[in-house]
Amino acid sequence: MVEVGGNGRIWLLSGEHSSYALRLTRHDELLHLHWGPRLALADAEALAAEPPQRFRSFESRLDGREEYPVEGGPRFVRPALSVRAADGGGGRGSEWEFRGAETDDEVLRLTFRDPVHRLGVTLHYRMRAGSDVLERWATAVHEGGPGDPALDLLRLDSAAWTLPRADRRRLSHLHGRWAAESLLARAELTPGETVIGSRRGHTSHRHLPWVALDDGTAGEEHGEVYGCALAWSGSWRIAVQQLDDGVVQAVGGAGHDDSGLVRLAPGESYTAPVFAGLYTGGGFGAASRAWHAWQLAHVVPDAHTPRPVLYNSWEATKFDVELDHQRELARRAASMGVELFVVDDGWFGARTHAKAGLGDWTPNPDRFPEGLKPLADEVHGLGMHFGIWVEPEMVNPDSDLYRAHPDWVHHRPDRRRTEFRHQLVLDLGRPEVRTYLWEQLDELLRSAPIDYVKWDFNRSLTEPGAHTDPSLPHVQGLYGLLDRLRAAHPHVAFESCSGGGGRIDLGILSRTDQVWTSDNTDPLDRLPIQHGIGQIHPARVTAAWVTDSPNEQMQDRVSSLRYRFVSAMAGVLGVGGDLARWSGEELAEAGRWVELYKRIRPAVQLGRLYRLREPQEGLSAVQYVLGDDPERADEVVVLAWLQAQRYNESLPPLRLAALDTAAEYEVLAGGEPGEVLRGAVLAHRGLRTGLHGDLDATVVHLRRR
Ligand code: GLA
């Protein structure tokens, strides 16, 4: 809901439990007024009517108070907008005039213009009904005419978020590396700047574009928490600044540096990605639930359809893809209840190893002499959907495509072409590259009944552009290609993968159905990864596989099928082991876990998440809840894991959240048949898990009677 007051110069956006307010001064300065609990318009007007603070000559009257700090004037904070004419005329910096405001039920648009650069800037705010997530983004348009110089947007951030003053601020963010992505880091903020981001041309394994801020006292289920997350899959930056008066501002957008994001010719425009923000008074848990609900309702396509249990052959075969072996894997996968069978890398071109074939998206004639259709038909005949792996943005120098078009990759004519994993990156900013990929992929999807595409991206961009960020047109091209493929093949689901979790963000999630969380499939290592990614993204989009034990990738750690399944059940369950080597007993046990997962899947994938105990050394657990009333769960699923038990240690019961304490809950799984537990006991004393020993795990499924 958007309300307007103060003679059309105060705006108040209100969500379910929070409000956001801003105002325009008579000098056309756009100042932040409020972000926090719900306010009435009269409250925002009272805030705006307060006399301004006094400032001394070395201080800025605008720093930390503006909605969108531009470079120039009495400002010294990191600017969201920095612009100069390509010929240097007019210098850097902006001084804008207010043009006008437009509002409807959910959206506010405020337009400004810099008369010297003839740059139009519009700030957008959208608060959707039923949510507390405020979506913000900015657009810039070169309003000059023919003959005017181009404008270099050195930086055009999506938004700047201003927090109310507090004695302390603590920053939470997700960091990591390949095979250990999305680990939660939480530390006191100090004066100055903390910058996270990616200079790699993709979101990266190093950081997810999300931060949360609290005053140091928030917990899982209490305290004020602010968060912001960027919907962008190229290079990016979020800078959190604590100013000298304690005000904290987080400014973020596409691109990592201030040296040139995009060049606009007269008439051209640029739209920055959404930088979404959220306030909650209910702790980190409520923040995650609000992020999840918003993504399921407004970001992820078709999010209310649960994702199927998949089988992926990568860890079983690596590049040795062979038709009969695939058939055998498919039969075994079907027998355990798998719903989607995915052939990974190695089915196309000369791709029998990592050094060749990327770029040539036709089935390898030795491996699939009649194409993919016979296998796809057989998989469908077994009652499963059929999926394939592709890495369309890449090319091996040893490929027909590269031999024909060596100029299609990101490169500088006078420099060496940097290779990683023997591959170069196609420049999706070029229309001919997009046309080629569209034709190849469209043809591939028509050539066989393919239901699912795992879209990989296995190396970072390395060659810097001339004036602008090369990841920007690349990602715009990628988004356009994905959108076009989805529109032409609406029944095909897409997974975003980038060597595991190197491209997980709200931008890619608005056009893919799930993400590959990490190449690390060790069930113990996965728990902190899942704990981290769940801060922002719902289990509905985070794929997890049960693989072989000992797990060769993870220094041969041995774990039970039970532990591996319960770990992977905290996401979109998949299986990725070499089923040809699993015993009949193992296949049967796996089948029982898959069946149980299907029963708990609506709660896990679409329910509300409560983190009961963090994944540290001992016992950890999560709870998923279904039901219309957030305080009186109809259905509850608890997943609990015990890493190791000390001698004579008795484990604490798990106090469950959101239960109806006046009701009884029937145990559907994880207890005695017919067992009934009292809601009040589960909430106050807690659930006894019965776990013991090392690497034990359980699933408890309860339904209100
Ligand atoms: C990446 C992915 C893996 C697998 C390989 C195939 O590393 O993350 O799951 O698909 O590529 O080359």
Image (spheres, rainbow, N blue to C red):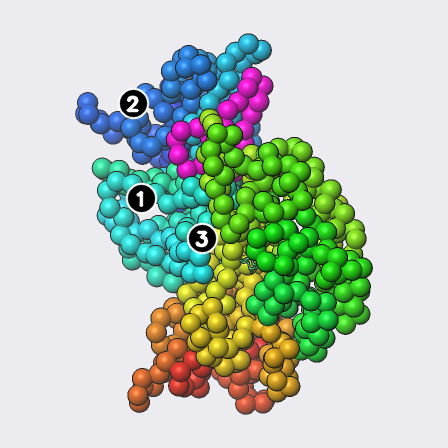
Q: Secondary structure at mark 2?
A: loop
Q: Residue 33, percent across and down?
A: 37, 35
Please state if 212 lies on the left or on the right of 192 as rendered.
Answer: right
Q: Which residue is mark 2?
A: 74
Q: Nearer the viewer, mark 3 or mark 2?
A: 3
State whether residue 107 is above or below residue 641.
Answer: above
Left or right: residue 285 compared with residue 593: left
Q: Quadrant of residue 590?
A: bottom right
Task: Count residues near mark 2 (Cα–Cα under 10 Å), then give few for <14, some for 14-19, many for 20+.
Answer: few
| Magenta-drawn segment | 255-273
**Where residue 194 is drawn, which disc sits there?**
1
Identity of the amino acid at label 3? Answer: His
Q: Find disc 3 in the rendering and name its residue.
A: 205
Which residue sits at x=46%, y=79%?
A: 558
Give me the C-alpha separation between circle 3 and circle 2: 38 Å
Q: For the point 40% across and 29% down, which residue is it?
A: 259
Please tell me whether residue 481 belongs to the stretch shown in magenta: no
Task: Evaluate whether residue 409 shows in this view.
Answer: yes
Cβ–Cβ under 8 Å for marks 2 and 1: no
Tell me what residue is drawn at x 45 percent, y 61 percent. Answer: 179
